Image (cartoon, rainbow, N blue to C red):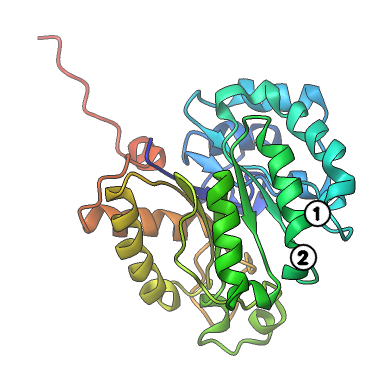
Amino acid sequence: MNFFIGCAIWAYKGWVGELFPQGTRQSDFLQLYSRRFTTVEGNTTFYAVPNQETVTRWATQTPQDFEFCLKLPRDITHNGRLQPYIPDALKFLEGMRPLGKRLGPVFAQLPPAYAPTLIDDLGAFLEALQQTGVRLALEVRHQDWFTEPFAGELTTLLKSLGVGRVLLDSRPIYTGDDDPQIQSERRKPKVPVQFSVTAPFSLIRFISHPNLPVNQPFMEEWVTQITQWLQQGTQIYFFVHCPVEERLPSVELRLTPTTARHFQKLLEQSGVAVPPLPWNILDNPPNQLSLW
């Protein structure tokens, strides 16, 4: 497929009644999620490394064309220099092998403290991991990575290794609503959005506002950009986040799955050639042909 869409997680009880049928057990969340979306970011691996039994179960519970885009553990990416943790990163990637073709790009999210002065360390780390054959992507958060000459140096490095760029768009959550709860949830970094593609694929992390209209102008911008990239043959993974998943008195809240579904609808209405969303097919099953 050329386009994958999903959320950051699959196991959220608050989605029962919207994404999942009423009465759904938590043990069935992944199986049902994977039949409604085509990918998941898999934030769970950032906090804890699953054992082989768990990874194998993930594979058996999901369709063959579903993909996990997992995040490298923070114990690897958030302890200063990366090179000392190459053995741990290689062990992590090896542990994900049971996913087979379901393993999408794995990405490293670097903390704001990881500066461009460490680019040699970064290059050595990515080169070591690239030799495994697993597709890799990178998200940077230090502000200097977004200014020249460092932005150009990073782009050159990623292109030379075939490593994708993770594009973080936190603009919606910093726009509009002054609800105190929303303000308290503005934990994602406010970094510039650079529409840069460095590999045959790209990961987009869209930090949505719970009030759907606030997202609209940014989503329309992404529709235009994604249309261009798909026409150029770039494979796109689009993940919708929302820091707020509870009812707020001041907004008509949309849960993350509904926001993702809305973006899929925008793409289709714009004539973008993307695969149908499995969730929509479930809601609109084809009419059975009469036997007579």
Does residue 165 lie above or below 216 as drawn? Answer: above
Residue lying at 77% horizontally and 49% vertically, measured from the top left: 46
Point out the residue furthest to the bottom here: 178
Q: Secondary structure at mark 2?
A: loop
Left or right placement of residue 271 versus residue 129 in this view? left
The residue indicated by pointer 1 is: 77
Q: Nearer the viewer, residue 155 or 292?
A: 155
Instruction: Judge the density around disc 1: few (<14), some (14-19), many (≥20) Cα neighbours within 10 Å.
Output: many
The residue indicated by pointer 2 is: 111
Q: Which tag, 2 or 1, sits closer to the chain's start?
A: 1
Instruction: Judge the density around disc 2: few (<14), some (14-19), many (≥20) Cα neighbours within 10 Å.
Output: some
Residue lying at 44% horizontally and 71% vertically, measured from the top left: 212
Residue lying at 22% horizontally and 57% vertically, measured from the top left: 269
Point out the residue furthest to the top here: 292
Separation of marks 2 and 1 at Cα, in angstroms: 8 Å
Identify the amino acid type marked 2: Pro
x then y, percent, for residue 32: 55, 34
x then y, percent, for residue 289: 17, 18
Identify the amino acid type marked 1: Thr
